Amino acid sequence: MTAETGGTGEAGAVPGPDGLLRTPWALSDPLLLTYYDTEWGLPVRDEAALFERLSLEAFQSGLSWLTILRKRPAFRAAFDDFDPDRVAAFDQRDVDRLLNDAGIVRNRAKIDATIGNARATVTLRASGGLSDLIWSHRPAVTPQPRTMAEIPTQSPESVALAKALKVAGYRFVGPTTAFALMEAIGLVDTHLIDSHRRGASGLWPV
């Protein structure tokens, strides 16, 4: 997620309908609230799950995360649950099928990149795998934001991760997308300090 987690506003954590404090974007839609409370920022190490998150972050480029979240069931159906081996075997017929699937984001460049990234994921297994590559970029410290304005959109580690992914053959993964991925899987914790989800990953002190 990029658009919702960054920003220049001075808003701090705000109470939800249950009185618990959360980062403001989590309260903009019930789907985002569920995602924030049950998934965002929790550690993910499974290869297919990481490939899915990497793919969806790339598809989000230029769009809102809510748009992608609403389409996630359709994305999963269209991309065989983001099984890297299956997606790596996609051919032109699959590309044509995806371009005609109104349930997903029909962007040829992003579709081609996702298929190419699946092939890169398969190839990467010989040198440790996608999970090892991503998690090797865990920083020594995590941000401590009190307001939306204090949440970064990239970091030295996300720049390095984007570069490493590019070397490994991945596309549509720049430093901002890499940082959004790091947030989503708990590699960094950008929950606002006062949010009830701060420290939910168990990887960082509250």
Image (cartoon, rainbow, N blue to C red):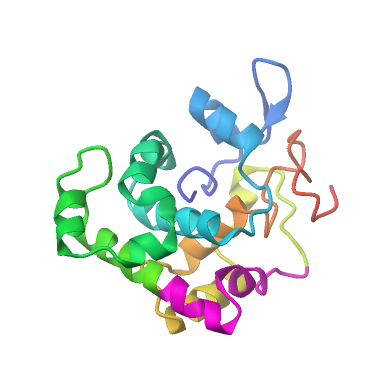
Residue in front for this viewpoint, 127 or 58: 127
125 up-or-down from 195: above or below: below
Image position, residue 106 (x, y; %): 21, 49
Residue in front for this viewpoint, 191 or 34: 34
Image position, residue 167 (x, y; %): 45, 84
**In this image, 90 relative to 46: left or right?**
left
Image position, residue 116 (x, y; %): 33, 71
Extreme residue toward the right, this view: 205
Residue in front for this viewpoint, 102 or 6: 102
Q: Residue at x 73, y 23 (%)?
A: 20
Image position, residue 165 (x, y; %): 48, 76
76 up-or-down from 18: above or below: below
Task: Tell me, yes or no, whether the highlighted magenta stretch contains residue 95.
Answer: no
Q: Residue at x 51, y 47 (%)?
A: 7
Determine if residue 67 is in view.
Answer: no
Determine if residue 61 is in view.
Answer: yes
User: What is the magenta segment's predominant secondary structure?
Assistant: helix
Q: Residue at x 76, y 33 (%)?
A: 196
Q: Residue at x 72, y 28 (%)?
A: 21
29 up-or-down from 201: above or below: above
In magenta, the rendered stretch is: 120-140
